[in-house]
Image (spheres, grey):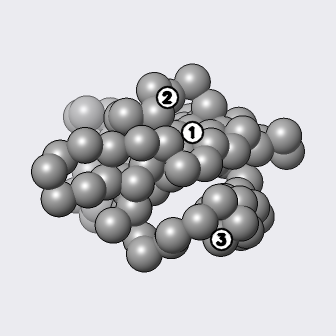
Amino acid sequence: MTEVYSAKDGQPLKQGKLDYSSIEDKGEAEADAKRRCQRDPTIKKVAYYTTSADGSFRILYSYTNPNCKPAGQAKPAAAAAPKKRTPKPPPKLGFFAKLAKALGLG
């Protein structure tokens, strides 16, 4: 069994994503690492550890992506400035209000 750790730029390898694989040799690991980095260019480092039944492990292969692109920042949902509200016009006068105004009562 092989443990495959892949980490983004600035992330410790052991805190990266962990996958399990049946890769047995360094050639397979190298091809797989390059394929992973092409699929996800934000991966900075990939490491392959061979594990045994008694719990011991040894490093099989380690690859650092020379073409690593930094992971993008989350874009805010409301990036545009909020629209300014225009004040509502005063309500139109009804019949009795117009009559009162015309007579000078209001």
Is residue 10 or residue 54 the one in the foreground? Answer: 54
Inspect the image, locate mark 3, and give the three-letter code of the amino acid beneath it: Glu
Q: Are the residues tagged 2 and 1 within 8 Å (C-beta)?
A: yes
| Residue 78 drawn at (x, y percent) | 52, 44
Inspect the image, locate mark 1, and give the three-letter code of the amino acid beneath it: Lys
Residue position marked by numbered label 1 in the rendering: 8
Residue 91 lies, with reference to residue 64, above or below; the image says below
Residue position marked by numbered label 2 in the rendering: 11
Q: Label 1: state its secondary structure.
A: strand
Q: Name the quadrant of the N terminus.
A: bottom left
Q: Name the quadrant of the C terminus.
A: top left
Q: Quadrant of residue 93?
A: bottom left
| Residue 75 drawn at (x, y percent) | 57, 43
| Residue 36 drawn at (x, y percent) | 64, 64
Inspect the image, locate mark 2, and give the three-letter code of the amino acid beneath it: Gln
* Circle 2 or circle 3, nearest the eye: 3
Q: Residue 28, which numbered label?
A: 3
Q: CA distance from mark 3 to mark 1?
A: 22 Å
Is residue 6 or residue 40 the one in the foreground? Answer: 6
Q: Earlier in the sequence, mark 2 or mark 3?
A: 2
Residue in view at x 62 percent, y 31 percent: 9
Residue in view at x 14 percent, y 51 percent: 54
Q: Would residue 34 be seen by someone viewing this image from the given angle? A: yes
Q: Label 3: state its secondary structure.
A: helix
Classify residue 60 as left or right of residue 30. Answer: left
* Circle 3 or circle 1, nearest the eye: 3
